Amino acid sequence: MKILIAGSDLNARLLAQYLKLEDNNNDIFLTDEEHSSCEFYTTVKIKENDIASITDFVKYNQIEFTIVTSPIAIINGIADEFKKEGFPVFAPYAEAARITYFNSIAKKIMYKLKINTPKFGIFDREGLAVEYIRKVKFPVTIENDFTLPDRESYTYTTFSKAKTGIQKIFENNNEKIVIESHIEEQPVYIYFITDGYNALPLVTLEKTADDNYIQINAPSQKISEEMIINILQKIIYPLLDDITKYSDMYVGIIGLKVKIHNNSVFVHEFYNSFQNYDFQVFLSLLKDNLLNLLYDTVNGSLADNHNYIKTISDYSYSIILNKEYVNSATYDNIEDDNIISSIDKENYIYTTTAPTVNKAKEKLLEYLSTKTDKDIVKQLIKENFEKELKI
């Protein structure tokens, strides 16, 4: 199949590689101005916001299926334009995806649908926002409304610091901000795939970070099957139904950032694609045919052909390290002893799987000991793992 991936991020490159390894007959193109063509895909020098040129490329090169990982392309209406042309595309419509770009819209819809979310306020004037924080209980989290090009999110414990934070966000040309009560628990990320009618869970994961590395493990041990069913019934399906009141159906990936507090799930925000480094975790666990899964979703036959997403029964564990901590001469961009590795800007991302999270961590620790020549980082990682594994 001739496939175009509209995107240039790590997710796009991982997807292209995975689909090529899944079926070598797939002919894959990538809209990427920075990277060169390789054995897995051919790059096409088109900007992600140039929807007309992307549409022409699909038309004149007889592309059979387009998969969009670029948030820029989605917000610029690539799915809307492709619908006019009759081209199959895996991406939500721009209007349907508003909940993933505007915090204010997401919060208002959650309030209307009675979806648990931290207490919040939405403000378009600095003075009103400052008056609001005079009356709230700290800590609070302050975020920009429109999340492109960057999501700004800061947590403050005092009025004076929060006031300064409000001023800074408005000075960055943000027209609105969202202020919400801060929940201390670590977030959990949950991803679903949906054809607008039905939805299936893809993966749940937890992510922690410090100054030296990021760790991700999946599936999350904080999320039970009962919780997933509850999230589908009380969050995902009401949300999909509501979207159809002002847009065509939401088709694609819908991710949630949640926190679990007092046995209740609180939703913080929505995503229209996998966040940084999360896609590699999902791919490490996937057993299903990914191309068939995406194509069935676009065709509206997700539930007809998939009762659930087939995954391995193991746990996945990832660590993301800055390049300066890794001996580049030893880097492998291939699967090595069940270790998946990739490069994203300044970071190396390593992922492995094992029957338990601890076994996966032990395996990756041993592998990384051959890849990093920075003693201080090796010691930091070792101490972290020893504490968690109680060695």
Image (cartoon, grey):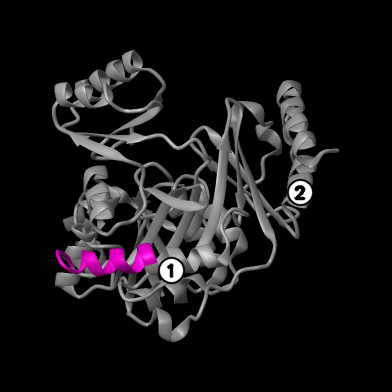
Nearest to N terminus: mark 2 or mark 1: 1
User: What residue is shown at x 79% (from left), y 45% (from top)?
Assistant: 362
Q: Quadrant of residue 89?
A: bottom left
Callout 1 crowding tier (Cα within 10 Å): few <14, some 14–19, many ≥20: some
Report whether residue 241 is seen. Answer: yes
Question: What is the residue that sits farthest to the bottom in this orientation?
Answer: 304
Residue 7 in magenta?
no
User: What residue is shown at x 37% (from left), y 69% (from top)?
Assistant: 194
Extent of the magenta region:
234-247
Are discs 2 and 1 less than 8 Å apart at CB? no
From this view, report whether residue 356 is shown above or below residue 65: above
From this view, report whether residue 385 is shown above or below residue 167: below
Residue 130 spot, x, y in % from top left: 22, 21
- Residue type, mark 1 in image: Asp
**Label tally:** 2
Q: Where residue 377 is drawn, which disc sits there?
A: none
Q: Quadrant of residue 126?
A: top left
Q: Quadrant of the N terminus?
A: bottom left
From the image, state whether disc 2 or disc 1 is nearer to you: 2
Report whether residue 148 is seen. Answer: no
Residue 246 in magenta?
yes
Residue designated by label 1: 27
Residue 69 spot, x, y in % from top left: 37, 55
Name the dominant secondary structure of the magenta segment.
helix
Left or right, 220 with reference to 94? right
Q: Where residue 358 is drawn, which disc sits there?
A: 2
Q: Quadrant of residue 216?
A: top right
Q: Nearer the viewer, residue 102 or 354?
A: 102
